[in-house]
Amino acid sequence: MAKKVLFALTSHDQLGDTGRKTGFYVPEVAHPAEVFRTAGYEIAYVSVRGGSAPQDGITGDDAVVSAFLDDQATADALAATPTPQELSAEDFDVIYFAGGHGTMWDFPDSAELTELAAGIYERGGVVAAVCHGPAGLVNLKLSDGSYLVDGKQVASFTDDEESAVGLTDVVPFLLQSKLEERGAKFTKAPNFTEHAVADTRLVTGQNPASAAKVAQLTVAALAG
């Protein structure tokens, strides 16, 4: 039976009070989806509120993203995502928290999404996340009450990168700092360069350049 990956997407489309739109960062789904598809995985999607997930990061000069968006089955799936409470952890081998600034507003407080991820992890699956996707990890606790990230190597969009894009005072919290508060052993590379790390079925990446690498490490983690 084919393994199945569930991409978790933000439903939040407002970048604070800047008047700018946000959503899930499409390249951070398109590129890892290609990795998973090549490895024979089935792909599914979920969003915090369900329905059509808001999109961000589409530039028009990325062939992988264009092919992803042009696929009718993908378009149909993204237009009608289920909510976390409609899904069962038993049906998935991986949950992949995609980034995009919107995640900072709705991932942490979605108890249903974190419970789904904890269930996937505790049945032997992988929890993966990239860029701002690890916002879904900051309140993710296991059944013993411990934070999933506590004591594990973790990467995410760094505080320095947030400063570099001018959004330190816009986001509700700084992701690196919050993960460190939860006990994560934070690891990073220079701003906007590829960096991903795997630790005990938790696979995380720093930024959009790291999205495919996160998928590659996830496939490797489940190949043994």
Image (tube, grey):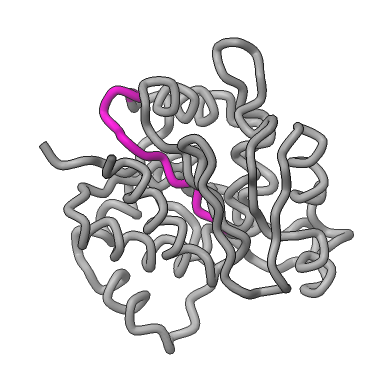
Q: Position of residue 75 (x, y in %)?
A: 28, 61
Image quadrant containing the N terminus: top left
Outermost residue toward the bottom in this view:
61
Q: How many marks?
A: 0
Q: Residue at position x 70%, y 54% from top? A: 187
Closer to the camera in the image, 131 or 166: 131
Outermost residue toward the left in this view:
1
Q: Is residue 185 above or below residue 99?
A: above
Q: Is residue 72 above or below residue 85?
A: below
Q: Position of residue 223 (x, y in %)?
A: 27, 44
Q: Is residue 170 above or below residue 151?
A: below
Closer to the camera in the image, 15 or 211: 211
Would residue 132 appear left or right of 170 to someone viewing this image? left
In magenta stretch: residue 176: no
Closer to the camera in the image, 157 or 50: 157
Outermost residue toward the top in this view:
144
> Within the image, what quadrant is residue 110 found in?
top right
Q: Position of residue 136 (x, y in %)?
A: 60, 39
Image quadrant containing the C terminus: top left
Closer to the camera in the image, 192 or 88: 192
Q: Is residue 150 above or below residue 63?
A: above
Q: Residue at position x 79%, y 41% from top? A: 180
Q: Residue at position x 64%, y 65% from top? A: 21
Would residue 25 appear left or right of 83 to someone viewing this image? right
The span shown in magenta is: 88-99
Q: Position of residue 109 (x, y in %)?
A: 66, 31
Q: Residue at position x 62%, y 60% from top? A: 206
Outermost residue toward the right in this view:
169
